[in-house]
Amino acid sequence: MELSHLRAVAVFMTVLVIVSLLSSIAIVRRILMVTSVLKVAARVIGEVKALIIFPVIPYTILKIFYMFWFSAALHLFSSGQVLENDCDSDCCTHELGLKRVVCDHCCGYSIPYTPHIGAAILFHLFGCYWATQFCRACSSTVIASSVASYYWAGGVTSVSFCFKYKVINWR
């Protein structure tokens, strides 16, 4: 029984390796293109050093936003009137503070949401999604613009460009 399982796994892995090898051969041009793009990206990061530490800024902004968002979400989810559930059957609980069994008020509590609170929760969730995507898009735009300006300047950063063409006036 175990031998048949091992043979089945060996056949499956052989087929998987053959398929992955054939797909790698089929996309070799794309792999070469990606390696050339990665070389240019490494050169850009080597020249524009601020790209290395830039992701810290949007992540810090998002952390601060998430702290405020989470506190507002806790406030929204805990708002409403606390009501005791109706008890249809006899139930008893063990009160740890009293160290005895209590048979009243054991059905628990619930917080029914009004339609306004439900709409506020949905709006709050959408706002979190929108703000997160906006921050990510802004950071992507900053990175794309810095890489594009480096690329279209012919591989020259702004500081070396200024020194090369004597744009800086040293008075």
Image (cartoon, rainbow, N blue to C red):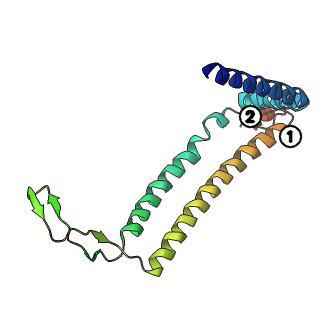
Q: Kindly indicate the quadrant of the structure image that contains residue 28.
A: top right
The quadrant the N terminus occupies is top right
* 133, 156: nearer the viewer: 133
Q: In the image, is 130 to the left or to the right of 71?
A: right
Label 1 or label 2, whichever comes before in sequence order: 1
Q: Residue at x 51, y 76 (%)?
A: 119
Is residue 127 depicted above or below 35 in this figure?
Answer: below
Residue 66 appears in the picture as rendered: yes
State the image coordinates of residue 168 (x, y, percent, origin top left): 76, 37
Amino acid carrying label 2: it is Val
Q: Kindly indicate the quadrant of the structure image that contains residue 105.
A: bottom left
- Give the residue pinned by disc 2: 159
State the image coordinates of residue 25 (x, y, percent, origin top left): 89, 26
Q: Residue at x 64, y 51 (%)?
A: 136
State the image coordinates of residue 5 (x, y, percent, origin top left): 65, 24
Q: Residues within 10 Å of mark 2 (few under 14, many from 20)?
A: few
Q: Residue at x 71, y 21 (%)?
A: 10
Amino acid carrying label 1: it is Trp
Is residue 49 depicted above or below 127 in this figure?
Answer: above
Q: Kindly indicate the quadrant of the structure image that contains residue 92.
A: bottom left
